[in-house]
């Protein structure tokens, strides 16, 4: 949209004063939300924060690197159960969370290997197989899944005189902000550009010196790390885990969030996460029509806004900037 | 241009501040002199959408009670929300209801019950009846259990009952189990083993064949069951899988005696499996609800259908919900005019040897007993109906 005059300027996250102003205003509104918003909204936003981390990770893989994956539920489960078991063994929350991400990333690397030779629908099937395999292993292994009663995970205590809901809210707001910053930095670094190059044309990317093996594997590992963290945070929020919480439906909602939010867009990932959480919740009074409303909303967005919610967002921004001229 | 953006910014800050501090009122949430608000979160969409009929049944019964004048002069207002069988969404629904509802009724799903169990004591919102693995509460701290009332059979006890009945009354010598490959199915396996080990001569479990909930082709499962050589097969599947396996078994000419868990207690199984296959099967019925065909249950079904014709065809599950609402109504009646969470808890604990509208086995709650009734009875599929063939076997309440 604007003329960028130097490389340094391009790397800057916030280029305009008013962009910074709006972001700070938004952050303030979010920080103050527990004071003016209903507790219910605080909870829903907490869910959106958690979900947005995973969606960002998947967008790095699907949107930026162009690798289709349907194994998200598997990574979520790995993250969640790693976190659950570690916390039960008495490990600190943050360490357990890091391990949840790392274990998911490790499996991401393993799943990434087929991606070196597989493309498009073939890769989709391979990753889908992984997601289902993880689910099956958890269902059939009582040691891993906590058996018939599932796994009860110690919840966060209420900290700093806040209520428990608010503690969760700030904890997840902090992490979501952190991961959003990491995502922005990642995509403007050499790593992100290598991902985009692979997506646009892997052969020319290789000719330009991008090592396909390393970067494709990295894309899988990093995106799985994000999804693992999402799983850990989900476990922490609900305080309870069982394998049936990580079926193919979870994969679908993450995938829908990426597509509806907008491929290759960090803002889009957050909007997409908000979409998949908010639509069923806002329409939860519509009873059995919820899936219909959800499906129709997805179709409408894809028809009228092929770039997803982030495309609409860009257009609104452009319109406001140009106003009253068109 | 900067001016304009600045103006928008200032305006939004003013708007934001305007939103701050919304007024809170009402001494007891969800209760006025004329109304009591009850929350329900249930799967109306997603993999377990069929079971959401329980909430429809509960709502229909509440409407009927309202038409008869309500409870202690108060009408019951039901807030019904879909959770898609997803614990995160159920929790979101519950937090939204907080402050609006007086009590929650007919929660469904083990994961949902587990994720939300602390919510009720923390917010002093009574939870009247849950359809979930009751062992969640067996070791739950007594002070937190105060607000939770359950009358649902324990899966393991039910499986024990099935195995015992099969050997003692159906004449089973060699038993095989067909079960869903998850925690529910494995609990059934435990129960069956316990049941068999207690019997004289210790009849053997000839084999156990699991299936995945996503599977639809069950021909090999039928073969495996036949290979066990069992003369009686115990079924622990969903309704769909129960119908499918019986059809496959019939196809290969394997017709053992069949004893099924209460998820197959609905006479609708005749339609799903076909009359030739379903006739003669022994399905169980839980002690907390009734069976279509029983006069007391049929009366309730007629009433429910008047208020919600959508219940037709799903009467068995709707009855569960109606009975749950009866538990709540009874508690509200006992609590009297002065309605608080504490008085409802007391009102529920006053329920003794009570059969809701003549349905099921007697229910008793007490300060040290929040598991109202834990039992099963056996039925037999005869001429399109499920006819009771045994009295209720009541197991010890677990909490």
Image: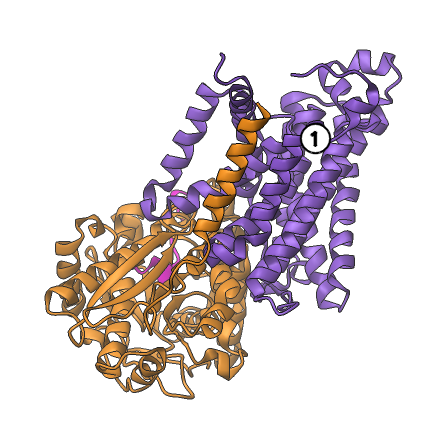
Chain colours: A purple, B orange
Work out whether residue A58 can be spotted: yes
> Which residue shows up at 40% across the image and 45% down it?
A282
Q: In this view, does B85 lie to the left or right of B181?
A: left
In this view, the residue in front, B201 or A152, is A152
Q: Does the magenta stretch include residue B374?
A: no
Residue A93 position in % (x across, y down): 73, 61
Using the image, determine if residue B44 lies above or below residue A158: above
Which residues are the magenta region?
B251-265
Using the image, determine if residue B92 lies above or below residue A251: below
Residue A24 position in % (x across, y down): 64, 41
In this view, the residue in front, A191 or B384, is A191
Work out whether residue A132 can be spotted: no
Asked which quadrant contains residue A108, the reply is top right
Q: Is residue A35 left or right of residue B366?
A: right
Residue found at the very far left of the displayed protein: B68
As helix, strand or loop, the secondary structure at mark 1 comes to helix
Residue position marked by numbered label 1 in the rendering: A61
Residue B393 position in % (x across, y down): 35, 79
Residue B389 position in % (x across, y down): 26, 71
């Amino acid at each position: 949209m604007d003329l960028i005059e130097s490389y340094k300027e391009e790397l800057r996250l916030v280029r305009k004063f008013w962009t910074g102003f709006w972001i700070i205003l938004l952050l303030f509104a979010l920080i103050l939300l527990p004071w003016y918003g209903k507790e219910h909204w605080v909870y829903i936003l907490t869910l959106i924060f958690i979900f947005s981390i995973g969606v960002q990770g998947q967008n790095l893989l699907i949107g930026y690197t162009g690798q289709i994956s349907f194994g998200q539920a598997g990574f979520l489960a790995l993250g969640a159960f790693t976190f659950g078991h570690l916390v039960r063994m008495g490990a600190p929350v943050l360490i357990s969370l890091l391990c949840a991400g790392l274990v998911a990333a490790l499996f991401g690397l393993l799943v990434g290997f087929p991606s070196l030779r597989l493309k498009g629908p073939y890769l989709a099937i391979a990753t889908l197989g992984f997601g289902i395999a993880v689910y099956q292993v958890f269902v059939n292994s009582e040691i891993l899944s906590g058996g018939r009663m599932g796994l009860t995970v110690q919840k966060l205590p209420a900290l700093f005189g806040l209520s428990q809901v608010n503690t969760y809210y700030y904890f997840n707001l902090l992490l979501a902000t952190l991961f959003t910053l990491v995502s922005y930095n990642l995509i403007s670094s050499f790593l992100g550009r290598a991902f985009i190059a692979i997506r646009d044309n892997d052969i020319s990317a290789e000719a330009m010196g991008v090592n396909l093996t390393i970067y494709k594997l990295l894309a899988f590992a990093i995106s799985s790390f994000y999804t693992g963290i999402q799983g850990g945070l989900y476990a922490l929020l609900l305080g309870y885990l069982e394998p049936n919480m990580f079926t193919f439906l979870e994969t679908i909602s993450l995938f829908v969030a990426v597509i509806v939010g907008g491929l290759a867009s960090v803002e889009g990932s957050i909007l997409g996460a908000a979409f998949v959480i908010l639509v069923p919740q806002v329409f939860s009074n519509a009873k059995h029509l919820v899936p219909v409303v959800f499906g129709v909303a997805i179709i409408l967005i894809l028809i009228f806004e092929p770039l997803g919610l982030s495309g609409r967002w860009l257009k609104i921004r452009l319109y406001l900037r140009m106003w009253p001229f068109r | 241009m900067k001016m304009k953006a600045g103006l928008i910014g200032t305006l939004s800050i003013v708007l934001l501040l305007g939103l701050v501090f919304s007024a809170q009122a009402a001494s007891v949430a969800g209760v006025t002199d004329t109304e009591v608000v009850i929350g329900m979160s249930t799967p109306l969409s997603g993999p377990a959408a069929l079971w959401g009929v329980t909430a429809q049944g509960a709502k229909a019964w509440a409407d009927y009670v309202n038409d008869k004048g309500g409870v202690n002069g108060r009408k019951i207002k039901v807030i019904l929300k879909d959770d898609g069988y997803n614990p995160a969404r159920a929790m979101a629904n519950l937090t939204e209801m907080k402050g609006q509802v007086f009590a929650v009724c007919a929660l469904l799903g083990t994961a949902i019950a587990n994720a939300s169990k602390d919510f009720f004591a923390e917010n002093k919102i009574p939870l009247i009846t849950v359809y979930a693995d009751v062992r969640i509460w067996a070791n739950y701290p007594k002070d937190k259990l105060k607000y939770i009332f359950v009358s649902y059979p324990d899966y393991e006890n039910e499986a024990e009952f099935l195995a015992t009945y099969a050997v003692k009354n159906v004449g089973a010598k060699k038993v095989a189990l067909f079960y869903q490959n998850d925690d529910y199915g494995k609990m059934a396996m435990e129960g069956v083993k316990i049941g068999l080990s207690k019997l004289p001569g210790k009849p053997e479990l000839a084999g156990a064949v699991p299936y995945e909930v996503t599977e639809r082709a069950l021909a090999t499962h039928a073969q495996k069951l036949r290979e066990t050589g069992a003369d009686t097969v115990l079924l622990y599947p969903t309704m769909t899988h129960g119908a499918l396996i019986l059809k496959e078994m019939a196809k290969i000419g394997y017709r053992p005696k069949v004893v099924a868990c209460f998820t197959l207690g609905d006479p609708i199984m005749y339609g799903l499996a076909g009359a030739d296959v379903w006739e003669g099967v022994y399905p169980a019925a839980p002690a907390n609800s009734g069976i279509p065909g029983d006069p007391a249950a049929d009366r309730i079904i007629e009433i429910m259908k008047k208020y919600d014709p959508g219940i037709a065809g799903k009467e068995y599950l709707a009855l569960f919900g109606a009975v749950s609402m009866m538990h709540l109504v009874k508690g509200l009646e006992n609590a009297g005019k002065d309605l608080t969470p504490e008085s409802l808890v007391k009102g529920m604990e006053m329920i003794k040897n009570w059969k809701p509208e003549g349905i099921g086995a007697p229910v008793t709650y007490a300060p040290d007993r929040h598991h109202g009734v834990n039992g099963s009875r056996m039925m037999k599929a005869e001429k399109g109906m499920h006819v009771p063939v045994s009295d209720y076997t009541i197991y010890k309440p677990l909490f």
